Image: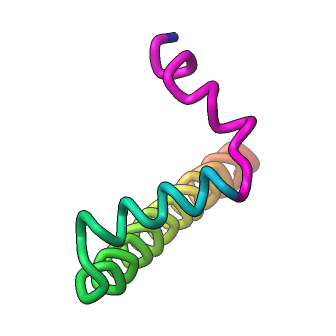
Amino acid sequence: MCLNIIFLFLGDLGGGEMMVILTAILLLFGADRIPNMARSLGRGMREFKDATNNIRHELEQSIKDDLKSKED
């Protein structure tokens, strides 16, 4: 609930606000660290997606095996 209230402003985020946010990020982290942070974020997202796909595949395989064993 509280998280929803905090991020309500994201619906009205315009171009000017985005520029201010990007400038602040650039000043805080520096131009040399931003690509590394983006790369790490991309790797994390890829690992999460792969783990989700593995879990989905295992669940589907388990369901198929259960159905097959019930047919026999």
Going by the image, does 9 lie left or right of 21? right
**Residue at the spot 51% in from the left edge and 66% down from the top edge:** 49
Colour treatment of the image: rainbow
Q: Residue at x 48, y 65 (%)?
A: 22
- Residue 11 vs residue 51: left or right? right
- The location of residue 71, given as percent across then percent down, is 75, 48
Q: Image quadrant of residue 57? A: bottom right
Residue drawn 55% across and 29% down? 7
Magenta part of the chain: 2-15
Q: Which is nearer the eye, 55 or 37?
A: 37
Q: Main secondary structure of the magenta part?
A: helix
Residue, x 46% and y 12% (percent of image)?
2
Residue 45 in percent (x, y) is at: 45, 67
Residue 42 lies, in percent from the top left, at 44, 76
Residue 16 in view in this figure: yes
Residue 3 position (above or below residue 58)? above
Residue 43 vertical position relative to residue 6 in the rendered view, above or below: below
Would you place residue 32 above or below residue 30 in this image?
below
Q: Relative to the observer, which residue lies in front, 19 or 62? A: 19
**Figure quadrant of residue 8:** top right
As drawn, the residue found furthest toward the top would be 1
| Residue 69 shows up from this direction | no
Residue 10 sits inside the magenta stretch: yes
Q: Is residue 51 left or right of residue 18?
A: left
Where's residue 58, x and y in %? 52, 60
Magenta residue check for 30: no
